[in-house]
Image (spheres, rainbow, N blue to C red):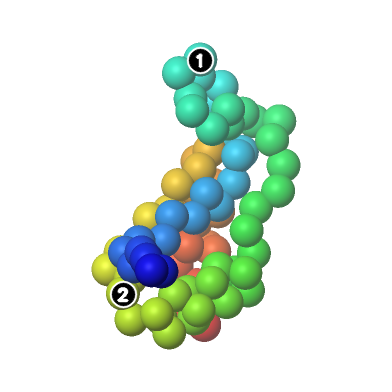
Amino acid sequence: MVLYMKLKGVHFLLTYRCDLECDHCFVWGSPKAKGTFTFRQVKNILQEAKKLKTVDYVSLEGGEPFLYYPSIVKNG
């Protein structure tokens, strides 16, 4: 017997970069962290998730995802 789980949500850890460096941070964000998801990467993942027809929500997380606000609101 094969069991499948339906993917209900997509969480994007857009970046580890943050303007703070808190001891309680579970992603170890900091101002020194580098790298982000590109708009193209996010768009491709969302297109694939849409094909599943099971995804109900998308979460943007990080570090501090709003450091990249233009990428968050960009239309494609």
Given the current orientation, which residue lies at the most extreme left position? 56
Element marked by disc 1 = loop
Q: Earlier in the sequence, mark 2 or mark 1?
A: 1
Q: Which residue is mark 1?
A: 23
Q: Is residue 10 above or below residue 23?
A: below
Left or right of 49: which side holds 67? right
Residue drawn at (52%, 49%) of the image:
13
The answer to which of 68 and 49 lies nearer the viewer is 49
Residue drawn at (62%, 58%) of the image:
37
User: How many neighbours does mark 1 have within 10 angstroms: few (below 14), some (14-19), or many (20 or more)?
Assistant: few
Kind of residue at badge 2: Thr
Residue depth check, mark 2 versus mark 1: number of the one nearer the observer: 2
Element marked by disc 2 = loop
Kind of residue at badge 1: Asp
Q: Which x, y percent locates residue 63? A: 53, 38
Q: Which x, y percent locates residue 44? A: 57, 77
Q: Which residue is mark 2?
A: 54
